[in-house]
Structures are given as C-alpha cells and as structure tokens.
Amino acid sequence: MSEEKVSLRERVKLPPAAALVDAYYRPAIAYGTKYMFGEEMRIHLAHGLMLARQGIVSGEDIAKTLRTVLDLRAAGPEALDIDYQQEDLYSYNERFIVSALGPDVGGRLHTARSRNDLNITSWRMALRRRLVQLSETLNALREICLRLAREHAGTIMPGYTHTQHAQPISLGYYLLAYADMLERDAERLAGALDRCDRCPLGAGALTTTAFPIDRDHTAELLGFPRLMEVAYDAVSSRDDAHEAVSAMAIMMTGVSRLATDLQEWNTLEYGFIELSDAFSSVSSIMPQKKNPQGLEYIKTAAAYVTGSMGTVLACSKNTHFADVNDGVTGLNAATMDAVERSTHALAVAAGVVDTLSVHPEAMLRSAAIGFGTATELADVIVRETGLSFRKAHNIVGRVVREALESGRIAPEMTASDIDTASRALFGQPCVISDQAVERALDPRGNVEARAVRGGPSTSEVNRMASERLARLEADRAKIAAVVNRLAEADARIETEVAALLAQCSAHVKQLDGAVRE
C-alpha cells in the first residue's frame, strides 16, 4: 500500500474542500499538533501494549509498531508531512506508521479503538496536565498572599465599601481575604481536575468493542485513577471542559478584582503602593509615565477567559448528546486558550504582588483622616453611655457631616461635637471623655479591637494565615501526588515497551539461530 493510499477517507471520493481545510482542518490540526501529539504517542504505546498483553495482536507486530511510534515521537510532528488531505492529527500519525510498516502490520494498532475515544482521551490528558500546572501557579499566588498577610498584619489602611472609606483594616487582612478566595478557587480546580482525570479509552466509537480489551490496564498506563465507565458517556460528554473553564472564569474574575484595586492604589491620588519596574511599561511621548502593564494584562486575560466560558458552554448547548464536532470537539480551542491565559495571568499576579512597594505611611494617614473610624466611635458611645446603637449612629453621622462641611478631618472631631449633636437630635446630653473619642478615632486601635474570630486584629490575621498556610501545603501535596502518578505512569509505559521490544528481539534471534542450524 503506497503512502498516497494510506487514508481514512475511503468512504468518500473527494478530498476535503479548500474552504473547509482553511476554516476547520488547518486550525484543528495545528491545535492537535500543539496539544495532543505527545499525549497521542503515550496512548499509542499504552494501547499497543494492551493489545499484545491481551493476545489481540501478536507481540511481534506490536513490537514493530511501537518501534515506529517511538521513531515518530523522537522525530516530532514535523515528520508527519501534513498535506491537509487527511482530517486530523491521528490520520497523519496512522499514515506515518502504515507507510513505514505496511497496512498488514501498521494497520493493526487501531484495532479495538476509535478516534472518538482516542481523541477525547488525548484532550483529557492534555487538560489534566495543564490543570495541574494551573493549580501549582495558583498555589504560588496563595503562598505569596499569605506570607505578605503576616508581614503586613500591622500595616493599617482604609477598608472600603462602594469605593468609600468604611472601616480601618490592615493590608494583611485584605490579602488574607483574597487568599481565602484563592483557596476556594483551588478547591474548584481540584474538583475539575478530579473529574477530568478519568479515562475514556476503550469506549470505542460509543459502545466499547467485542475484542477482549483491558480498559483498566490502559487507564493505569496513562496515569488515570479510574475509568469513564459508560462508553456512550465517555465519548459524548464534555463537562470536564465546561467545569474547568467555569472554575477558571470564576477564578479570573477574582484576580481581575485584585488587579483593579492594585491599579487604583498605584495612582498618585492614593499612593498606597508602587508596582515594580519589571511589571510596568512606559510612554513613547510622556517621559514621566510608568504604566501598570502587568495589572492591565491580568484584567484583559480575565475578559478572554470569561469569553471562553461562554464559548465552551455555547458550543455544547442544544447539540445532540453524542459525539459531535460542535458539542464535543469544537470547544477544545477555547478551553486550552482559557487555561493558558489563566496560568500566565496568575504568574503575572504572583510577580506583581510579590514585588510591590508598600507605603504604610500613606495608608495609615488615609485611614486616619477618612472617617472610617466612625463605627467604633458609635460603638464607644453605646458602651460608655448606654444609648442605643441607632441613636449613637445618628449622633456620629451628624458629627461627621458637620465636620466635612466645615473642612475638618476625622481626628478633629471632639466630645463636645458629640454632645452638641445629641442635644440637637434627641434633646439629651451625651457625655464621653475626649480621651475616649481619641481612642475611638485611632485606626490602629480600631483594628486591634476587632479580635473576635475572623477579625482584622494582628493576632487573628497571624492565626488565620498560619492555618491557611498549613492547608496550602496539604493542597500542594495532593497536586504533587498527581504529578508523581503521571511520572510513574510515563515510566511504566517506557519500561513495558522496552521489555516487549527486548522480548521480541530475543525471540527473533532464537528463530534466526534455529534457521542457521
């Protein structure tokens, strides 16, 4: 069989139309080559080993085939001579193998297998590896946030609601809160990874096969801890991609919110932080400019990932529950784009946060003058006078308004102002000491007073950060276990392939010796 005749397209007479090649096959093969080539080589080796082990194909034929697969793996996809007369990466892999060995030997590797289960297994393996990498990058950002949370547990700054001063917090408390959101992102990614990490191979087109294959063996060789058992589900479902990209979109939404805050705090008007030069860009005309390039990249990446989620879900929406290109294959590009952008964005975010220059004096001054201590002042009135909180709230609200109208800042409010407001509002005095007012208006005192569980006091921030660092290490251990499992599976394939090749080579030598005798 000549190379020109090695084709899967015997059912049709014409080659793919040029318009379809440009629109679909060319980009699909490019994506397949980028993401699936290495995974497909692993699958060929694992499937071939299983065929020989089960006696479905002779060990000698499989040995010849696997040698050719190893040659192709070493040569890389550049050896495939892609002419776009075939439909996908697998077609060119098979053409290479059959051209080298002939159809009687090379044509046996696809026994008991379909492109349906082959391709979905390749994509799950590719997504699995990238979810591991994404999780590792996310955990690096978590660690940085938790480390800086402890370092800045006493760096006082305003806490905001609706972009207005709310109550004093610390930068450490802010980063701790963000680290908790990242921890939930890690949990979602772990769930997505767990459900992606299931092996469809052996499902065939949709009903498995009548050949006595061992699906569990190939799953083990490919590093999967379990099967997608129902074959129809294995080739028809893409909730692995739906879930993964949804988790990424949620995560990137949170990362974009961090970037938005940092971008604002990086302005001259705030002066709370300064980005490292390494994550900044300049202007071609304005000499003074130092632009927050890293933060703007993060926000752009978040927009793309959100768009990818819509694309991935829309590709499958209203499609038949079966192996169909739009609902099963068509979402691969958007999925991989999302995971790559998310990984890059998290790496940039980690670098930005880790190299921030923090200006504690500017933060403390803003917290002191911005009336964020008003809640504590109302609380002090309640504790010292017995007034209801609502009355105390009204009194302090009036004092704040009058201070702003007269151009005063928060530390300039006095006990006399409080008494005057109380008499005007309720016709009764409100007597507290100037010292009590001064303590209430101290931002650091506000933070340290809130020492209940989950509060911003230094002791609570340090306690919570330590607990979360311990949980982070547990999460890292789980990811490391997946990495080790995949490495062990790769090593096992290599060992079993080498053993089969050695066994068949020894058998050939024995036969040669017998012939000579």
Image (cartoon, rainbow, N blue to C red):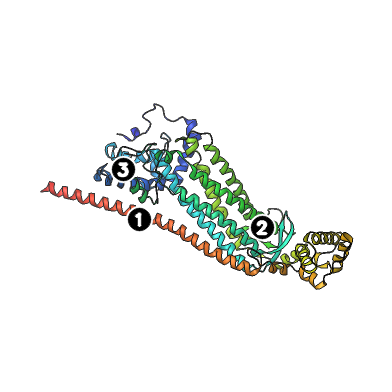
- Residue 2: horizontal and vertical position, in percent? 31, 34
Name the residue tied to disc 2: 262
Q: CA distance from mark 2 to mark 3?
A: 56 Å
Side (left or right) of 214 relative to 443: left
- Residue lying furthest left in this view? 517
Q: Is residue 208 above or below residue 421?
A: above
Labelled disc at residue 213: 3
- Residue lying furthest top in this view? 13
Classify mark 1: helix, strand or loop: helix
Classify mark 3: helix, strand or loop: loop
Q: Is residue 271 visible?
A: no
Crowding around mark 2 (Cα neighbors within 10 Å: few <14, some 14 to 19, many 20+) is many
The residue positioned 29% from the left and 44% from the top of the image is 51
Crowding around mark 1 (Cα neighbors within 10 Å: few <14, some 14 to 19, many 20+) is few
In this view, the residue in front, 495 or 86, is: 495
Q: Please, what is the three-letter code of the amino acid marked with disc 3?
A: Ile
Classify mark 2: helix, strand or loop: helix
Q: CA distance from mark 1 to mark 2?
A: 45 Å
In this view, the residue in front, 252 or 167, is: 167
Mark 3 and mark 1 in contact? Answer it, CB < 8 Å: no
**First along the sequence among labels 3 and 1:** 3
Mark 1 and mark 2 in contact? Answer it, CB < 8 Å: no
The residue positioned 30% from the left and 39% from the top of the image is 211
Name the residue tied to disc 1: 491
The residue positioned 78% from the left and 69% from the top of the image is 384
**First along the sequence among labels 2 and 3:** 3
**First along the sequence among labels 1 and 2:** 2
**In this rendering, which labeled residue sits more in front, label 3 or label 1?**
3
